[in-house]
Amino acid sequence: MILALETSCDDTCAALVDADGTIHANVISSQGVHARYGGVVPEIASRSHLKLLNGVIDDAFARAGCALDEIQLVAVTQGPGLIGALLVGLSTAKALAASRGLALVPVDHLDGHIAANFLAPDPLETPFLCLVASGGHTLLAAVRERGRWELLGETLDDAAGEAIDKGARLLGLGFPGGPELERLAGEGDPNAFELPRASGLPGLDFSFAGLKTALLYRVRDLGPAQTLQRRADLAASYQQAIVEALVLRVERALEQTGLERLALGGGVAANAALRTRLSETCSTIKLLAAELCTDNAAMIASAARYRPQLAHPDYLALDAYASGERAR
Ligand code: KG4
Ligand code: ZN
């Protein structure tokens, strides 16, 4: 059994997963405390992880009905993410593994989002194209085999989720904006406002900064009263622009690589409009349950199965990384 921890941002997560990818527990405690600030406050995230993590781990063991002595391997997110937040998970993982002389696997967060697609009971066969769209990252990967993927394109500025959260904030919605924006968009006309999708940008990279600025100008031109009145139309148009920007690159990548299967990862992949549009684009598409799209530790356990294990005490000096390094 693998015990995995994920604390890269504002979700405190622990999971127990078998070597064959069967999930026995996948506990996610979302830190609602950030909502009042309109975004994640790094120092508060670290402190909240400290408060929550032991309870979340206990909860995972209780739900799985297993004990610490049944663990053979400890996996943990090493980066990218908020350094203070990552360190809480990494230190806890080291302490748990070292106290029992167990091996530890440091996992790249993005590798985790991709590896969510390998979990039982319905793992996706390689090769496939994977779109990862979250609050911190937006990328397209050609997944050649489990544990080996090639970066095809990524965002040049904001991540899709970041653009969604900032747009939602402009429309007076709470944080995180994705679920609320989706709800409001359902009541509006997606063609009411024309917004840019960076379709002139060639290749497989993404850009959302222009779209975000376009929404800002629309809101300014309309003024507060009109904006409030047309909020649903603005939300629907904005969501559609983001979805179409993502779909355009996925279509290009499918054509360019000849890959026939598509997988989605990251919090934005929970969006129903995106799922529907992509299902039309590719007939073999894997749609994960929402709790496996957003940050979770089961995906970290899954990725750990395909990464080298570090024996005790070789991992004690491991450090977290905020960005850059990427396991492939
Ligand atoms: O992967 P994730 O949980 O955390 C990061 O690693 O960032 O992604 C969070 C992002 C947030 O920007 C959130 O607004 C977005 O995913 N999100 C959604 C939906 N649910 C979450 N975006 C659009 N539609 C949703 N239903
Ligand atoms: Zn994530």
Image (tube, rainbow, N blue to C red):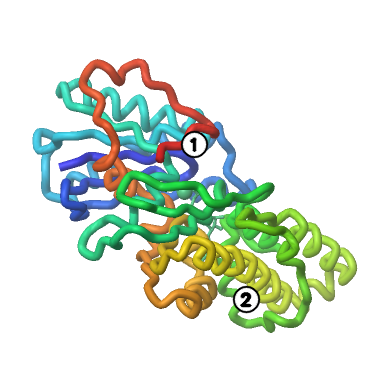
Q: Residue at x 67, y 48 (%)?
A: 156
Q: Residue at x 21, y 19 (%)?
A: 312
What secondary structure is found at the residue carrying circle 2?
helix
The amino acid pointed to by label 2 is Ala
Name the secondary structure under disc 1. Answer: loop
Relative to 326, is 291 on the left or the right?
A: left
Q: Is residue 275 above or below residue 27?
A: below
Q: Nearer the viewer, residue 136 or 204?
A: 204
Q: Quadrant of the N terminus?
A: top left
Q: Position of residue 322 (x, y in %)?
A: 53, 31
x then y, percent, for residue 107: 36, 37
Say what amino acid the circle numbered 1 marks. Answer: Pro
Q: Tell me if 122 is positioned left or right of 81 in this view.
A: left
Query: What crowding class fits label 1: few (fewer than 14 Cα within 10 Å), some (14-19), or many (20 or more)?
Result: many
2 or 1: mark nearer the eye: 1
Around disc 2, counting alpha carbons within 10 Å, would you say few (fewer than 14), some (14 to 19), or many (20 or more)?
many
Point out which mark residue 141 bears: none
**Quadrant in which the C terminus appears:** top left
